[in-house]
Amino acid sequence: MRIGRALENELVVSDLQVSRNHAEFHATPDGRFEIRDLGSHNGTYVNGQPIPKGGSALLGPQDIVGVGHSTFRIVGGQLEEFVDTGSVSFSARHLTVTVDGGKQILKDVTFGVPEKSLIGVIGPSGSGKSTLLKALTGYRPANEGDVLYDNRSLYKQFAELRQRIGLVPQDDILHKELTVQKALRYAAKLRFPGDTATAEREARIDEVLRELKLDIHKEKKVTSLSGGQRKRVSVALELLTKPSLIFLDEPTSGLDPGMDRDVMQLLRGLADDGRTVLVVTHSVAELGLCDKLLVMAPGGSVAYFGPPEEALNFFGYSTWADVFSAFENYRDYDWAGRWKGSQHYQMYAADIDAVAAQPVQMPQQAMARPPKPQGWGSQLWTLIRRYVSVIASDKGFMALMVILPAVLGAVSVVIPADFGLGKPTPPSRFNGDAGTIMLILAVGMCFSGAANSVRELIKERVIYERERAVGLSRSAYLMSKVIVLGVITAFQGVIICGIGFSTRALPEEGLFMPPAVELCVQVIALGLTSMMVGLVISALVKTAEKTMPLLVMFAIIQVVFTGILFQVYGSPGLEQFAWLMPSRWGIAGAGTTLDLAHLMPPWDHKDPTNVDSLWEHTAGQWSLDLGIQLLMATVCCVLVARLLRRHEPEVMRK
């Protein structure tokens, strides 16, 4: 029996998470059954673990086969199907999170979420709300306890169950420069299987836009929408794959009371339509719309779980301001003990542990990596197109990309030179301006290259975290940045060289190419290496504000260690440290073409033959200088890829 989205299958599953021909069941000669993957895009799962693409797995009587939103089990030779439409239970069991030093920031959190309901989570600062959200979604699994989705462990079966969960972080998970429809198109292209037709994707996008009443705004840029409407677009992005469980982290933060109510009513409608919605919020004005309320106490323990209308009476106060003040004034009080000893606990939480988690038997392929919905090349092409669209929509940034290198190139032109750059000089005289001109051009290229990339990863960090959790390839994401920014940086290098060398007399012959080409290649390579350093900075910092000081520091350091301002070679320690600077090798590459070792005045006037070996006027040295720059860029690329792992769900890293 073959399963898939196409009508020719024996079992048709109308779910865009399912490939056209997804998998098939087989009976073995000994009377057992096996499931065979047919090269599906989103994978076929046995007990939550992916089987290899095109591989197979034998099935036991308790094994659960996952295909998209559907699960199958063989009972008495018959195939039973369950389609996840939201009617599933969800519970947290004794979640405890411990950080370095043994401090617990989440303590024995246990609660059960009714199906198709809206759950509000509130609490004072420091009560562990964000930590709880990460534990519930698998982004940062709890050290102790488990999260059960339909009595299946989310942590052990994250590869499959992640497709059933939607997460809307506090920050928008979309590119504000794009229109609503275009942003959703790129998201759908990345999340749906590679064999999904354009018409199928467009139909699903239109369906979501109508459901959230965004169809009248689909041609507007996201940045032009109100705060409440932008939050709707973030929700729309998550609804594309029809998740049964949706988490939202403070969706009403920064919104006025009217928008606050609109967003909460939107979430109420999502729950009524058959989804379970859990929202972490600081706003208490619209808690009455929730089915259940979870109140977290300082220290990360549960202070209350139950109907919101009974919460204030439980605490014995008339307003939530009084409750939060009590939390602050009595931080050492055993709020969790008070809750567990109450009648409310017996009514709403005591029976949660009575439902045992469904036992599963892990298959041999448990360590197989979950497949990605799109192939690497397809993801790369989609990411490149999206990135180009984002840049093209920002006219100011595009203008700056041209103006910055033009100004930096023009600055070098105003430097007077008695002898043109590279022009033959009398034996007794040297062209001291040649080094200064190359210094300005090289440092200008360093600054341009790093400035292009220094904010690109940090500004998209929330978007990357979410897309990575649903199958984005880390290397495809990084290469899309490298390719697009690399083309921009190379274009800027041509502008800088074109203007900077326009009034200078260059040598008549290069080492093995025209001198202008050799110089331009070295300047572009310097820009690309600096661009990769900018990506390292962007991956390292925690906020975008920290990128500018680091960018300025990087540019200043490059000025110092070029070997132009003072003698670097022959100084133990200093010379070796300068080898780590891209500008040292960029200037060296240009110096080989211009023969700066003999064009500039020697540092050692007593021994004119004592020259910088990196400026040796040979083709081999030119190639070495270029190769070192490209090696630096490659090392930076590998480092960025490692740093990006820090911003992925922890369960995926393990």
Image (tube, helix red, strand yellow):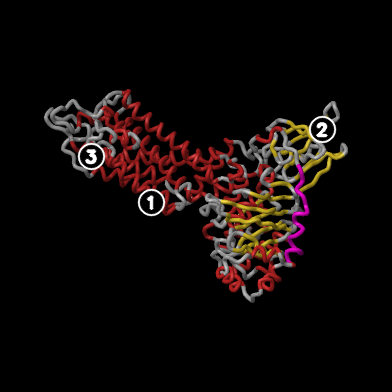
- The residue at the point 75 percent across, 50 percent down is 150
Q: Please tell me which residue is depicted at 81% across the width and 35% down the height of the picture.
A: 1
531 sits left or right of 504 in the view = right
Magenta extent: 344-359
Q: Are marks 3 and 2 in contact (CB under 8 Å)?
A: no
Residue at (79% x, 32% y) in the render: 34
| Residue 26 x/y as whole percent | 81, 31
The residue at the far left in this view is 428
In magenta segment, residue 106: no
| Comes first in the chain, label 3 or label 2 | 2
Q: Which residue is mark 3?
A: 565
Q: Is residue 302 visible?
A: yes
Task: Look at the image and say whether residue 354 sits in the magenta stretch.
Answer: yes
Mark closer to the chain start, 1 or 2: 2
Amino acid under disc 3: Leu
Give residue 439's quadrant in the image.
top left
Q: Is residue 512 left or right of residue 90?
A: left
Counting the numbered discs, the total is 3
Q: Nearer the viewer, residue 75 or 124?
A: 124
- For label 3, count other residues whose C-alpha is less than 10 Å away and answer few (under 14), some (14-19) or many (20+): few
Alpha carbon separation for disc pair 1 and 2: 60 Å
Kindly indicate whether the residue at mark 3 contacts the one at mark 1 (C-beta within 8 angstroms): no
Check disc 2 and report the residue beneath it.
Answer: 33
